[in-house]
Amino acid sequence: MQYRRLGRSGLQVSQLSLGSWVTYHNQVDTAAAREMLAAAMDGGINFFDNAEAYAGGKSEVVMGEAIKALKWPRLNYIVSTKFFWGLEREGNTVNRKDTLNRKYLMHAIDGSLSRMGLDFIDLVYCHRSDPHTPIEETVWAMSDMINRGKALYWGTSEWSAADIRAAWDIAERHHLHKPVMEQPQYNLFHRKRVEEEYARLYEDIGLGLTTWSPLASGLLTGKYRDGVPEGSRGAMPSMGFLVKGLTDTAKNAAVAQLAGVAAELDCSLAQLAIAWAAHNPRVSTVITGASKLSQLHDNLGAMAVLPKLTPEVMAKIDLISAPLAN
């Protein structure tokens, strides 16, 4: 495993990391999480991604219980959470969902700390931008969260480049803790935000990236070339919104071609896709997911594929996938 600095911070994160969206609590219980976290750490992974909204807070509980059982020294691992969606979906949800105001954020961090059983969270993200709360209020709240010792670094997830820059400028002007990282989707079919929209931010403000969905929700494993298989992510009722993209005819035809490239490199299609995302030097870490130990081990194999991604191989991959990317 190789490690990269998170933007301009001094924090070193593993090039591959392990996330909990969809899997924890829904497919992975505490015992399975403990086994996979241990295997991930043995493979060199030191960053484990979570969010308040995942499984209605239960994902944080599962991860927290697993980490407690493993008895790792706190310096050995990095955990994250994300705030915006809230946990209250019914009744009076004022100041409880879809917001980044100070009141919500101060309650949210305390809730995550309690569910995960930790004294502080390493990385805290604003899970989406909030057009109804002044960015200045959000920046002050996130900076105060760090000053109070409840978080170490803060960043954004799926924010526009303009909003990230506005938040950074506010923090610079008031001598507050600046946003260090962004968590965008990044894969062979979803690349323009990372490669074009954010391009100036890497040099201008030192933005780091912790990217998600390197397999395009499973599309880049090849499992959806003949429809939606039973037991897959696309078959889950809560993931129905993904089906149209997963069964896209043109993209699945491209996946078939990419499978040929993977065969030439003697790796799995998933390993090729993960290695491609990690190949971008702007990406601090690629967040992978797994519901089985075998998937985790296969994902870790992507590190051996990285040296094989020569300019010629990258050009071949781009010829197949870039025309279909957004």
Image (tube, grey):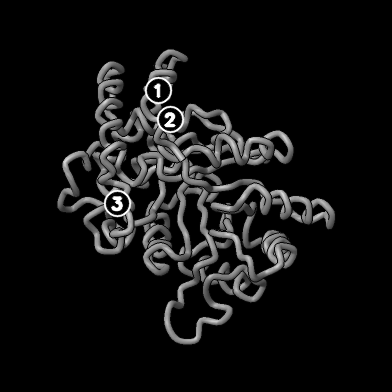
**Tags 2 and 3 touching, CB below 8 Å:** no
Residue positioned 55% across, 39% down in the render? 194
**Tags 1 and 2 touching, CB below 8 Å:** yes
Query: Nearest the camera: 253 or 306?
Result: 253
Quarter of the view holding residue 131: bottom right
Mark carried by residue 244: 3
Q: Secondary structure at mark 1?
A: helix
Question: How many labels were placed on the picture?
Answer: 3
Q: Amino acid at mark 1?
A: Leu
Residue 323 appears left or right of 297 = right
Q: Which residue is mark 2?
A: 322
Q: Residue furthest bottom?
A: 92
Q: Amino acid at mark 3?
A: Lys
Distance, label 1 to label 2, CA atoms, is: 6 Å
Query: What is the crowding at mark 2: few (fewer than 14 residues within 10 Å), some, or many (at least 20)?
Result: some
Q: Secondary structure at mark 3?
A: helix
Q: Amino acid at mark 2?
A: Ala
Distance, label 2 to label 3, CA atoms, is: 19 Å
Residue 70 appears left or right of 166 = left
- Image coordinates of residue 23 in percent, x first then y, are 32, 55
Distance, label 3 to label 1, CA atoms, is: 23 Å
Mark carried by residue 319: 1
- Image coordinates of residue 119 in percent, x first then y, are 57, 62
- Image coordinates of residue 105 in percent, x first then y, are 61, 69
**Mark positioned earlier in the residue sequence (2 or 3):** 3
Residue positioned 26% across, 36% down in the render? 252
Relative height, residue 286 to residue 260 (above, below): below
Query: What is the crowding at mark 3: few (fewer than 14 residues within 10 Å), some, or many (at least 20)?
Result: few
